[in-house]
Image: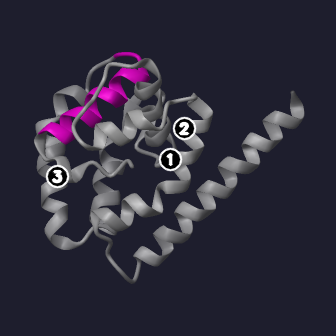
Amino acid sequence: MQRIRMKATGTIFFISCVVMANLQNAESKKLSFDEIRKALQPVKKHCLDRVGTDPKLPDNAVKGNFVSDRKLQCYYKCMMLNTKVMKNDKIIEKALSKIAEHMLQEDSVSLVLKAMEKCHSIAMKSMDGCQLAYDYTKCIYDYNSMLLIYP
């Protein structure tokens, strides 16, 4: 059991390093949504494995086919936790806006901030973290599908 826990901790550390390396690169270059999705592929793999989500579910959600599946909901929670926009089953909008301002190309920042404003009431809800992550992700998608950064 201890060995599995150490392996998971090592995996999370590695993924965090990959994300941080991409964030460091973002200092000199603002990223497009596609570049962010690509950078998040290791996090996607980690979350799919950790939650046991069928890979088809997030792939279909990117195309607009969101199903109310517990594992898909927890996949989005895992993605949010690993990108530091969720903590203690609460969405941290301040962190999300800072990420947008520091990482995204200028023309994309205002789109994200408007989507966050539109979905603010969902972010403020007190509910199970998996359900909250799913509802917020779906709200962002419904506002503008291009803004869904989680692959």
Q: Where does the image place residue 135, in percent across and percent down from the top left?
A: 27, 27
Q: Going from the N terminus, do you reach mark 1 or mark 3 first?
A: 1
Q: Is residue 14 left or right of residue 44?
A: right
Q: Is residue 89 visible?
A: no
Q: Residue 32 in magenta?
A: no
Using a 10 Å C-alpha cutoff, classify the residue at mark 2 as few (fewer than 14 neighbours), some (14 to 19) or many (20 or more).
Answer: many
> Circle 2 — which element?
helix
SS at mark 3 in the image: helix
Q: Which residue occupies the foreground of this view, 27 or 11?
A: 11
* Residue displayed at 32% across by 38% down: 60
Q: Is residue 7 visible?
A: yes
Q: Nearer the viewer, residue 129 or 61?
A: 61
44 sits to left or right of 26? right
| Residue 12 location (% of width, % of height) | 66, 48
Give the residue at mark 1. 44
* Element under disc 1: helix
